[in-house]
Amino acid sequence: MATVILVRHGRTTANASGVLAGRTAGVRLDGVGRAQAARTAERLSVVPLAAVVSSPLERCRQTARAILERQDGTPPAPTERGITECDYGDWQGRTLTDLAKEPLWATVQSQPSAVVFPGGESMAAMQARSVSAIRRLDAAIEAQHGAAAVWVAVSHGDIIKSILADALGMHLDLFQRISVSPASVSIIRYGAHRPDVIATNTDSGDLSWMRQVAPAGDAPVGGGAGTQAPPPPRS
């Protein structure tokens, strides 16, 4: 199937101050976050993108706009509620230092599948709706643009971690082992047999090799030859 690049939004004012923003309206990228988004947009500028899809929250839409500004001919980014931030309920707007004192904090760290945020959603429901949205969008983009299509989904840390955990075949209770930094790039190809996790949490490096990614197939025994960036154009 198509290849999805999962991009977390850049750093926000809430991230910098240690506040759990959740779905709070008006949380925007700070200066560091704008620079991070620009750097990621530069990395992705060498990859012709079939689509850019964003969480409805402003910090993701800002990051998506930065990516689109470096693309040629990619349609404006639609928003997808299925990849919006977790509904943290009563935890939203509180500092992480304060939340770490809550009894539920230990469960979030060790058994996320059992967590239901007070006044919010469960982490299991968060994973189910985000994975479903990504797989649905991936199939639709492949149907429209072909199996070689590459697209971007701009979302949030816990959302991307849960999608990666599913693709890696990890139980949700292990997803805290995955790190997803602001404006990082993770890459998945969904194949007929299994997802192929190509990269996680990268914030640097050449991505021009993605112009020649082949559709996912059988896993090569022994690891295969990998991918190579195309040679630079002749002057």
Image (cartoon, helix red, strand yellow):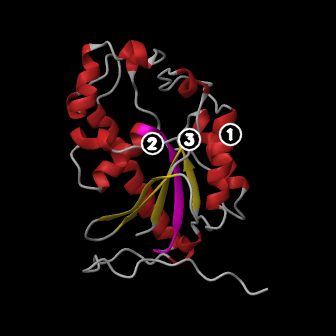
Q: Disc 3 designates what residue?
A: 9
Q: Which residues are magenta?
A: 147-157
Residue 122 among those drawn in magenta: no
Q: Is residue 101 left or right of residue 1?
A: left
Packing grade of label 3 (10 A; few <14, some 14-19, many >=20) is many
Q: Tell me if residue 163 comes above or below residue 56 in the rendering.
A: below
Q: Disc 1 designates what residue?
A: 34
Q: Earlier in the sequence, mark 2 or mark 1?
A: 1
Q: Number of marks in the image?
A: 3
Q: Disc 2 designates what residue?
A: 83
For badge 3, the amino acid type reads His
Farthest bottom residue in view = 234
Q: What residue lies at 24% left-to-right and 80% top-to-bottom? A: 221
Q: Earlier in the sequence, mark 3 or mark 2?
A: 3
Q: Give 200 or 68, whichever is nearer the viewer.
A: 200
Residue 155 among those drawn in magenta: yes
Where residue 95 sits in the image (x, y, percent)? 46, 16
Q: In this rendering, which labeled residue sits more in front, label 3 or label 2? A: 3
Residue 77: tell me if it is visible.
yes
Q: What residue lies at 47% left-to-right and 39% top-to-bottom? A: 156
For badge 1, the amino acid type reads Arg
Quarter of the image that includes the C terminus: bottom right
Q: Is residue 73 left or right of residue 221?
A: right
Tell me the element at label 3: loop
Q: Give 85 or 171, whichever is nearer the viewer.
A: 171
Where residue 64 sits in the image (x, y, percent)? 62, 47
Quarter of the image that includes the N terminus: bottom left
